[in-house]
Amino acid sequence: KVYVGFADGFLAAFSVEEGVLLWESRLGDGNKFVDIDSTPVFYKGNLYVGSLVGDLVMVNSSTGSIIRRLNYKVARAPIVFNDKLLVGTNSGELVLLDSYHKELMKKKISKFPISSMNVWKNRIVASTIGKHMFLVKSADFSIEEKFSLGTSYSAIFGQTEVKEDVLAALSSRHRLYVFR
């Protein structure tokens, strides 16, 4: 299956072999900015996806039915981290959830929404729509380093990429940052 999010708040699954629509489900519950533009994440057999104005939603990957809405507003998809779900919120928080969605750890690291997360050198890299990237200790979410992208109009809207020991990010001002 291929899962695709649409600007009208729908998530759909298509057959890879035949290209036919298998199911569609409306996830966005607002009238504006309901875009499903985060990549769905598989965790414990289900999909987790969100829109800018809605909650993080747990979806049955086979049927498209909504299993649960989690009360976290997200700009981007969560990541699977140490067999847990790591969520970056629009409130600038990092939240670690177990498989039952119990909060194991929660910490505000920015006043701006978290726009991407990745794991690099056994730490969490979180970028914001503000001008900062954070290197965060996974044990307690304390900030180890804070990197400024330059101006208040710089942001990381896409995903950071990790390959071996190299971290790369492309800013909204089209600057490529590479960390070793």
Image (cartoon, grey):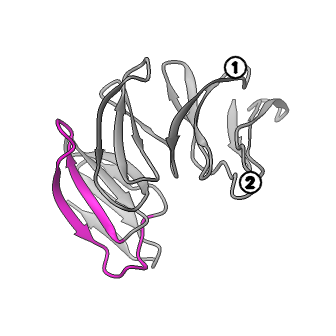
> Which segment is the magenta one?
131-156
Instruction: Assign the N terminus to one quadrant of the image.
Output: top right
- The furthest residue to the left: 144
Q: Is mark 2 on a helix, strand or loop?
A: loop
Q: Name the residue type under label 2.
A: Ala
Identified at 18% across, 38% down, the residue is 140
Please check the rendered image and state whether residue 150 is part of the magenta-colored stretch, yes or no: yes
Q: Which of 77 and 110 is in front in this view?
A: 110
Residue that badge 1 annotates = 62
At horizontal 72% and vertical 26% (from top left) the residue drawn is 64
In-front residue for pair 92/138: 92
Question: Label for residue 7?
Answer: 2
Image spot of residue 85 (x, y percent): 40, 31
Frontmost residue, 50 versus 112? 112
Residue 60 appears in the picture as rendered: no
- The residue depicted at 42 percent of the width and 19 percent of the height is 99
Q: How crowded is mark 1: few (under 14 residues within 10 Å), some or many (20 or more)?
A: few
* Vertical position of residue 53 compared to residue 80: above or below: below
